[in-house]
Amino acid sequence: MKRKTTGTGGVVDSVEHHWKRRPSEIRGYTRTLYMTDDNGDYLRVDYNTKEKRVRLYVEDASEGGIPYYAIIAGGRITAEKNAQTGRSLSLSDKFGQRAELFGAIGNREVLKLINENYGIGAKGKSQRGIEKRIVLERTRKRYFKPEDYGGVSRKEVIKQFFRLQRIDVIDMLIGAMIVSIVYLYFYDFYVAGIISGCFGVLIGGVDIFIRKRDPFFPKIIAFFIAGGWLYFYGYYYR
């Protein structure tokens, strides 16, 4: 059978890989598609087309077969959990790195229900674009929907929010230097404020799209606040 290798080390056959089909024994689902890939991971998709609901499931062989599942209803992810502990967590990486395998199920109706979540079935989109979408989704859930992480305390979410790394310190020093140079060149707080705000947006984009890491929001907010103060001070008192 002719095969192609995925960007994550997995293998996708040219004809639906090894996906098999049978009735689902899980309540609320009618059919199941399942397979075991060449890495030993067990993948499964339970679905109910009438209720527009899909359950994605994977047992990660690299972790000793720890099971994870995500539920997609109405085209939106409604639950992501470690099936062994019941803990809620982001599974963007778990399913995103296996997007090609899940996308090879060969059932268009089910792929439509998945709605390109985790990059599954995303046609005409580059792998880089899919990775960006995964990073954005992970960031959104970590910082803006902490209730999705039932196993993580609010204190831990706050600690992650304020966790400063060396690269963030360097960014802040570079940004402060750029804003200072702009001010010394133009002698205008108004212009310096605009540059500060723009740098905050720019460095956040660099974190997400180039470094592929969660942005350090206090760093971005600091440039916005400094930029706002400089802007209004320069606007009213220059």
Image (spheres, rainbow, N blue to C red):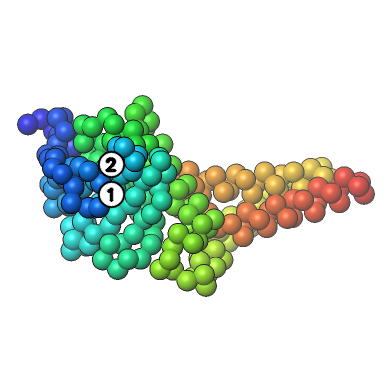
Vertical relation: 116 (above or below) 204: above
- Residue 148 visible: yes
Query: Which label was assigned to residue 12?
Result: none
Q: What residue is rendered at 30% in x and 68% in y?
A: 85
Q: Earlier in the sequence, mark 1 or mark 2?
A: 1
* Type of the residue with mark 1: Gly
Image quarter of residue 87: bottom left
Residue of label 1: 28
* Type of the residue with mark 2: Asn
Q: Residue furthest top?
A: 124
**Residue 129 appears at what percent x and percent y?**
41, 36
Image quarter of residue 32: top left
Q: Secondary structure at mark 1?
A: loop
Q: Residue furthest right?
A: 237
**Residue 91 appears at what percent x and percent y?**
35, 54
Is residue 5 left or right of 185 when viewed as pictured? left
Q: Secondary structure at mark 2?
A: strand
Is residue 208 left or right of 56 when viewed as pictured? right
